[in-house]
Amino acid sequence: MASPEFERDTLEHLNALYNFAMYLTHNPSEAEDLVQETYLRAFRFSHRFEPGTHLRAWLFQILRNTFLTFYRLRERESAVAEDGVPDWEVPMFHDAPEDSGRALEAHTDLERAMRRLPEEFRTVLLLAEVEGMPLEEVARVMSCPVGTVKSRIFRAKERLRGLLPDYRIRR
Amino acid sequence: MSERPDFSDEALSHRLQTELPRHAAPAHLRAAILAAAPRPHRSTWLAPSLAALGTAALILLFLLPMLAASNRPDDVQQLVRAVVSEHSRAVMWGTRTSTFLPTASSWLTQESGIALARVFAGDDALALIGAEPVYLLRERGVALHYRDHADRFLTYVALPAPTLQLPERYRVAVASWRPVLVQDGGFTVWVWKHGDLVCFLVSDMAGGNDIERFKDYFVRVRTATEPLLAY
């Protein structure tokens, strides 16, 4: 059971978590569900949080894990053949599909380009560049070494440049 | 003279920080989170709460026959909530009875209305710690409780539901099966049909490696358990 202080501390990150959820789901209603589920899990497992460590990274990690568990699995389901035999050969770094009709509209080229990035690249840019998280925190959220984070940031920026029309024209 | 375009990392970082719109959480979300947060139990509330629950259960018993029988979109959700409540009760207070060989128990079949032709009796990963009859949403069923090596508690429930249909959009491929994966109150639940029965496997396993392990547990239980309507 979470203490009132824990609830208050976690809720300070509500806007940042919702923003992250929006860039993962592109859908306000799904983003709300994802954030609410993140907080439920955080409150339920508050005893597992080590005081003095990074609460923000812990919350982002729960949100991303919840997203990957429930949304990725359902995405992957669409790759299953009619005979029910699963196809697990879905590439990790595939470009995201074009926006679906019920998703929130993207207003800028940069936003549209971000949406086309694979989740791993989008997440690393959102955490490191937009949220300004230190690389160690990003590594914790993404459960990978700091070196991997650095390399993903580099590759994400390369991919982003390729997706931005103004960069393509100038090259 | 035209301005030289800036391709640098710093320029792209600056664009990400300044041009990307930030989405603020809607005002009602904070209230919804706090309202859904689990609260500590207070013993002074127990008696009136139980009385109210008893009254509600009685009213429900009279009203339910008048409601449509099955295939409403929220049927699965209602069942999942009932099963999650049963799982929470077992986690908090343990199983009411313990039967370590449910296939051999005529008492369990008689009480639950469900026969277990085969049952997953545990292995090196999961230990069977109890089996008991349950009564959820006006249906008798059977519950099996397991614990894994990391002390995580899992509950398997089978209930009669001959006409229930599971939603396609939440199906996930696991081995050769396509169970539904749902979450409720911080718990994760596999739901699948087994003939005229609907079966559930509940745990608090959440993300990453946990969910892979939970899939493995589903396969173990699904493969080795054969529930049937006894009557």
Image: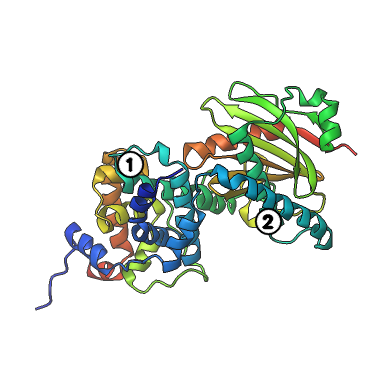
Q: Secondary structure at mark 1?
A: helix
**Which residue is identified by label 2?**
B167
From the viewer's perspective, tell me whether residue A116 is left or right of residue B36. left
| Identity of the residue drawn at 54% across and 34% down | B213
The span from disc 1 to disc 2 (Cα, nearest Å) is: 35 Å
In the displayed structure, would residue B2 be above or below residue B122? below
What chain does mark 1 sit on?
A
Few, some or many residues within 10 Å of mark 1 (<14, 14–19, 20+): some
User: Of residues B49 and A136, which is closer to you in this image?
Assistant: B49
User: Residue A140 shows which numbered tag?
Assistant: 1
| Identity of the residue drawn at 59% across and 54% down | A78
Q: Choose top left, top right, bottom left or bottom right for residue A18.
A: bottom left
Quarter occupied by the N terminus of chain B: bottom left
User: Of residues A6 and A146, which is closer to you in this image?
Assistant: A6
What chain does mark 2 sit on?
B
From the viewer's perspective, tell me whether residue B117 is left or right of residue B178. right
Please state the horizontal and vertical placement of residue A161, each as a whole percent of the image: 28, 61
Residue flagged by tag 2: what amino acid is it? Pro
| Identity of the residue drawn at 30% across and 38% down | A145
| Identity of the residue drawn at 48% across and 68% down | A103
Q: Secondary structure at mark 2?
A: loop
Please state the horizontal and vertical placement of residue A3, each as a whole percent of the image: 40, 45
